[in-house]
Image (cartoon, rainbow, N blue to C red):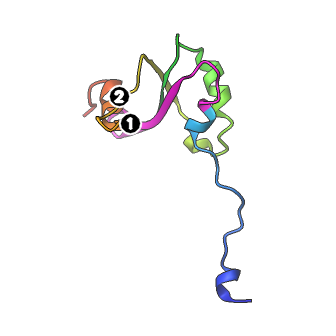
Amino acid sequence: MTSALLSIDDRGPPAPCPEAAIATLAQISDCAVTEVKVASGTTVIACFYCAPHPIDEALLFDHAKGCPARWKQPRLYRHLASLPRNANHKLNRRALRASFGPDVP
C-alpha cells in the first residue's frame, strides 16, 4: 500500500452546513448564515431567512440541530423579506452583516 493511500482522511462525510439544515423547513424560501458582531470583540453566527412570516425561534434552534457541528449552528435568527444579492444574483453577506445593525466599536 502506498503512503498516499494510508494518509486518506476517513472521518466520514463532511458535516452539513447550517444553511442546508435550516433550508429544509417548509416555510423557508431562502436563507443564509454569516458572522455578525454583537458587542466589542464578540461575534456570533446569525441566520437570515426569508419566509411568509417570522418563525418561532425555538423551532429554528431545534431544526438547526441537524447540523452536527455545534459551533456552526446559528445563535441568532433574523426574518427578512428578501436576501441582498448583487447584479449576478450572488448573496451579499456584507450587506447582511450591515442589515444586522450599526457596527459595534
Residue 18 visible from this viewpoint: yes
Residue 23 is left or right of residue 13, and the answer is: left
Q: Is residue 82 above or below residue 21?
A: above
Q: What residue type is disc 2 on? A: Pro
State yes or no: discs 1 and 2 in contact (Cβ < 8 Å).
yes
The residue under the point 67% across, 74% down is 8
Q: What residue type is disc 1 on? A: Leu
Residue that lies at the very extreme toward the front in this rendered image: 88
The x, y position of residue 57, in whole percent, is: 58, 19
The x, y position of residue 59, in whole percent, is: 65, 20
The residue under the point 57% across, 38% down is 18
Image mark for residue 84: 2
Q: Secondary structure at mark 1?
A: loop
Q: Which residue is mark 1?
A: 91
- The stretch of residues the image draws in magenta is 22-44
First reached walking from the N terminus: tag 1 or tag 2:
2
The residue under the point 34% across, 32% down is 85
Q: Residues within 10 Å of mark 2 (few under 14, many from 20)?
A: some
Q: Is residue 23 magenta?
A: yes
Residue 100 picture quarter? top left
Residue 45 visible from this viewpoint: no
Residue 51 is left or right of residue 4, and the answer is: left
State the residue in front, 81 or 75: 81
The x, y position of residue 51, in whole percent, is: 52, 17
Quadrant (top left/top right/bottom left/bottom right) for the C terminus? top left
The residue under the point 57% across, 44% down is 71
